[in-house]
Image (cartoon, rainbow, N blue to C red):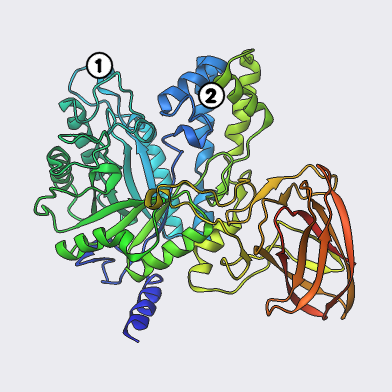
Amino acid sequence: MIRTAVFCTLLLSQFGTAQGFLKSQGQKIVNEKGENIYLKGLGLGGWMLQEGYMLKTGDFAGPQYQIKSKTAEVAGEDGKNEFYKAYLKNGITKKDIDSLAKWGFNSIRLPMHYNLYTLPIEKEPVKGQNTWLEEGFTMTDNLLKWCEDNKLYLILDLHAAPGGQGNDANISDNDKSKPNLWQSEENQKKTIALWKKLAERYKDKEWIGGYDLINEPNYPFTGTNPNGTDEMSNAPLWKLQKDISEAIRQVDKKHIIILEGNGWGNNYNGLPKLWDDNLVLSFHKYWTNNSQDAIQNIVDLRNKLNVPAWLGETGENSNVWFTELNQLLLKNNIGYAYWPMKKIDNIAGVTNVKITPEYQRILDYWKNGGEKPTKQFSKKVLMKIADNYKIENVEVKKDVIDALFRQVGDDTTKPYKNHSAPGRIFATEYDLGRIGKAYQDHDFQNLWVSSGQHTEWNSGNNMRNDGVDIYASDDKVTNGYYVGKTEKGEWLQYTVNVNQTKKYMLEIRYNNDSAENAAVSLRTPAGESLSTVTLPPSGKGWKTVSADGIQLSKGENKIRLYFETNNANINFLELK
């Protein structure tokens, strides 16, 4: 009973009125009324700072400076500049923030690249001084206004610090031919000055949720691991974050300051006595189990220091993993920010930026060489990609949104699409809902950090982010996709509105490229059999089989398609 009461209290506290400056109060983040504020956030990864995997250039250009070089190679310097101007303009707009608020988020994490706010140290006209660039500040001003309009908290995150804060070059645009943050006192001074400048600008802004000082430090100060996971003292990291804090407090006494440990944010070894009474500890979580032991280290540290914890970055996994993680975090009163909002060919995020065949041609050239695309062609293609980043042109992933929010506390299913009988039901349009309720699949998440083994969930990497394997379809009648890699014991559920109580004829459009018969059955959620259908070998093509006598009642029916064997690829069902 006590656990249930605590869970319900936390659930209600999510919806507390968000107003006034956020602050830490014991182990909670609260507003000025003392109400618990449960941060449900999204990180705008890929906007101010590109990472190669988000644009499908990761195999040959990971850090942003390399992506820019590749872009200039094919489109010219002018073409590159035009593309980036459009990319930044389209990447995040008021419509994006309006959408995030509508979907259920109450906070935004902004990953900032320092070079939008100030020059690199090697380009400063006067050594040791700071030239301030209006572009980054204006972008942040606009974003804050959109957040204020939607009552969303904006957390500023220095994602790419001057010089780069670690050996993982992709996440901080680290050019290893130049001194990094830890090798250069000038870079550290510029980092401190940038935060002081930001604090001066936003000190009176209540919808600034906090200052996330250095994203995912990963550096071997004294240890052997190149990303700092075995560091025991982390002395330079704690000194710099303390120095930044002191600079901020010279001009801003109110906003939360967020610390991150070494080793991509999670190594808090050597943390000295906390130097401020308005701190939050951030950690990052990817590809680990969603059990209490997976977060117990940060919970123990939170309890020991009596300070809030926040999951500043997570994601890149399946809907099952998202729902289970959010249930775990809610029970522990730990807010979150998922990653990222937009990337190309994305099923594991709230939106998908659509790739084009022409962009794939440029990617192929960059990776494999061959005939170089013309500047005119490349510029046109890249401008089309920039246009695809507009919120009105992306594909909104309603299954991901449903998993992040509704499914956390609701185990019922909802129709993915309105299906009726008579009518055609594409196999990929099964119900929205948790595994075991809307579908069953044997492979449904990636836990490689915990298990040591990489596993796929949707191995086709198309359309939806559940465990169901969905591939692009070449059938003559299609919604673009089919369900494949099916295994015995897996199933899919469909909600069907039936016009008339009667027995319907069922047609199944399928492919079975094995040498053996496959079989599927239709059942009710209670297990009542409606029909079993044999699917003979079909070679590489698609075939249709039919069965009579599918008894359905007028009104809403939920039917499940069970895979009785392996090797049944399904395009659609049709009830006549």
Q: Answer above or below: position of 515 versus 561.
A: above
Q: Position of residue 213 (x, y in %)?
A: 25, 44
Q: Residues within 10 Å of mark 1 (few under 14, many from 20)?
A: few
Marks 1 and 2 in Cβ contact (< 8 Å): no
- Spatial CA distance of label 1 from label 2 is 26 Å
Q: Residue at x 56, y 17 (%)?
A: 75
Tally the numbered discs: 2
Q: Quadrant of residue 237?
A: top left
Q: Amino acid at mark 2?
A: Glu
Q: Assign the C terminus to one quadrant of the image.
A: bottom right
Residue bearing mark 1: 125
Q: In the picture shown, does residue 475 fall above or below 362? A: below
N-terminal label among 1 and 2: 2
In the rendered view, does 122 fall on the left or right side of 319?
A: left
- Direction bottom: furthest residue: 1
**Front in this rendered view, residue 416 or 449:** 449
For disc 2, the marked residue is 82
Please tell me which residue is depicted at 50% across the width and 20% down the height of the picture. Answer: 70
In percent of width and height, residue 97 lies at: 49, 52
- Looking at the image, the residue that sits furthest to the front is 516
Mark 2, Cα crowd under 10 Å, few <14 / some 14-19 / many 20+, is: some
User: For residue 279, what is the image quadrant?
Assistant: bottom left
Q: Amino acid at mark 1?
A: Pro
Please name the residue shown 19% across and 24% down the image.
129
* 58 up-or-down from 527: above or below: above
